[in-house]
Image: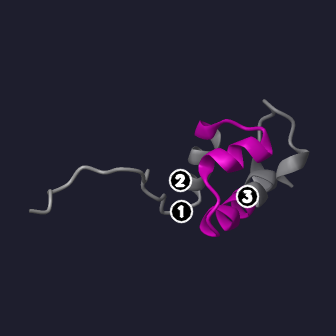
Amino acid sequence: MAETLKKGTRVTGADREKLAADLKKRYSSGESIRALAASTGRSYGFIHRILSESGVTLRGRGGATRGKTKR
């Protein structure tokens, strides 16, 4: 489904719901938003918006985080 979309086309209705379900499943299995964006040819913001609309709890950014230093 995601591979058949042309860049810049508006995704609405049933197509959007199908895309959202596909992206939600892939994101839940561990794929990153950037990886999903690259594989679908859509922007990071588009993927982020679709996931948010479909009720996915987004993961944190990861990497080094600041916190209390252990003494």
Looking at the rendered structure, the secondary structure element under dot 2 is helix
Q: Is tag 3's residue or tag 2's residue first in the polypeptide sequence?
A: 3
Q: Residues within 10 Å of mark 1 (few under 14, many from 20)?
A: some
Q: Nearer the viewer, mark 3 or mark 2?
A: 2
Q: Give x and y (percent) for residue 6.
A: 87, 36
Does the CB distance between marks 1 and 2 fall below 8 Å? yes
Instruction: Indicate whether residue 35 is drawn in magenta.
Output: yes
Does the CB distance between marks 3 and 1 fall below 8 Å? no
- C-alpha span from label 1 to label 2: 6 Å
Q: Which mark is residue 52?
A: 2
Which residue type does callout 2 highlight? Answer: Ser
Q: Residues within 10 Å of mark 2 (few under 14, many from 20)?
A: some
For the rendered model, the colour scheme is: one colour
Q: Which range is magenta?
A: 20-45
Which residue type does callout 3 highlight? Answer: Glu
Residue receiving disc 3: 17
Q: Residue at x 69, y 63 (%)?
A: 26
Residue closer to the observer: 6 or 61:
61
Q: Main secondary structure of the magenta part?
A: helix
Q: Residue at x 24, y 49 (%)?
A: 66
Please determine whether, in this image, residue 49 is positioned above or below residue 51. Answer: above
Residue receiving disc 1: 56
